[in-house]
Image (cartoon, grey):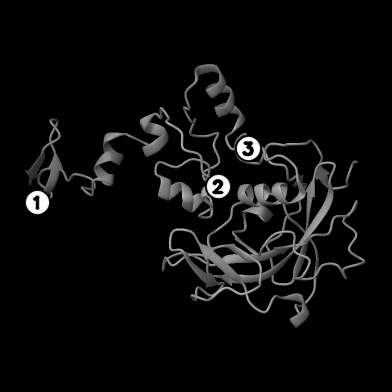
Amino acid sequence: MQCPGVKNDYGRTGSRGDILTNLQVFDPPRTKPEVGDLFAMQLADQGYLFGRVISLTAVWTKAIAAGPAVLIYIYDARRPSADLRVVEDLTPDRLLVAPIMTNRQPWVKGYFRKIANSSLGNDDVLSRHVFYSVPRRRYYDDAGNEVVPGSEPIGVYGLHSFRTIDDLVSDAVGIPRVATVGLTEHKSVMASGRFEPHANSLEGRQSALTLHEALEYAGMDLSKVAILKATVGRSAVEGDTSPRCRRRRRGLGRPRRRGRGRGVGRSRSGRARRVG
């Protein structure tokens, strides 16, 4: 089925790196999410799915410096086209998955496309939103308050990426998930038996150095984390390993030249020395 405005090659790579997704990528234009937006998603040969933006200020972590998340619904309503003249089945009691907190990347990368906007009424929103924090073993609402769960659908207390949303939707509609590494890495693993990520080919939230970091990237869902013994080049982990960048990472800053005041520099042996 050829759908207007959609690149319909199954498992198309994402816009950054060789990232495969079941969700198809819409052609531009792409807009920022706004409260009340109805948006379309498309799975190859599966028709269209629809979602709605509920809030732009959801709290997804207890970290003080973290920015807010976009709270969305994805409805259990599949259609052969993106025609939304009938919206009676797009209600909170017809959700495909539990409410999701995400960032703006699904819109930026073209996985979600805005098709309409209307103000939210009481019947359009659940009475409250509840999320479970795996590491804390507690329940929170979308304002970050600890709550006692009831009969409402329970989501994951964390920030979903477009990849984890792709997995959730794939599971819900009954199609296989795609590989969780880029094509370049997959070919390399199959050829060498080792995982050696290339800096420019992996989506930033697909690999981690610790289990806790991996859980954060996976929205605190342990079922989405794989542990793999890997051989990783220093540059892939630390980025630029030049002497200047190593000094800055160690908090020494740029060494001053002689005659321009006293400070701490680095000798050729790597030991700290007084200059000036």
Q: Is residue 123 above or below residue 267?
A: below
Real-space Cα separation, disc 3 to disc 1, in angstroms: 50 Å
Reading the image, the residue beneath label 3 is: 19
Q: Is residue 132 above or below residue 79?
A: below
* x and y, in percent, of residue 132 in the image: 53, 64
Residue corresponding to mark 1: 262
Closer to the observer: label 3 or label 1? 3
The mark found on residue 28 in the picture is none
Q: In the current view of this chain or complex, which residue is farthest to the bottom? A: 122
Q: Mark 2: few, some, or many residues within 10 Å (few <14, many ≥20)?
A: few
Q: Earlier in the sequence, mark 3 or mark 1?
A: 3
The residue that appears at 70% across and 59% down in the rendered structure is: 97
Is 203 on the left or on the right of 228, as rendered?
Answer: right
- Say whether residue 149 is left or right of residue 28: left
**Location of residue 180 with respect to 88 vertically, above or below:** above
In this picture, residue 20 sits left or right of residue 238: right
For badge 3, the amino acid type reads Ile
Q: The N terminus appears in which quarter of the rendering?
A: top right
Q: Which mark is residue 223?
A: 2
Q: Is residue 215 left or right of residue 142?
A: left
Residue 237 appears at what percent x and percent y?
39, 37
Mark 3 to mark 2: distance in Å?
20 Å
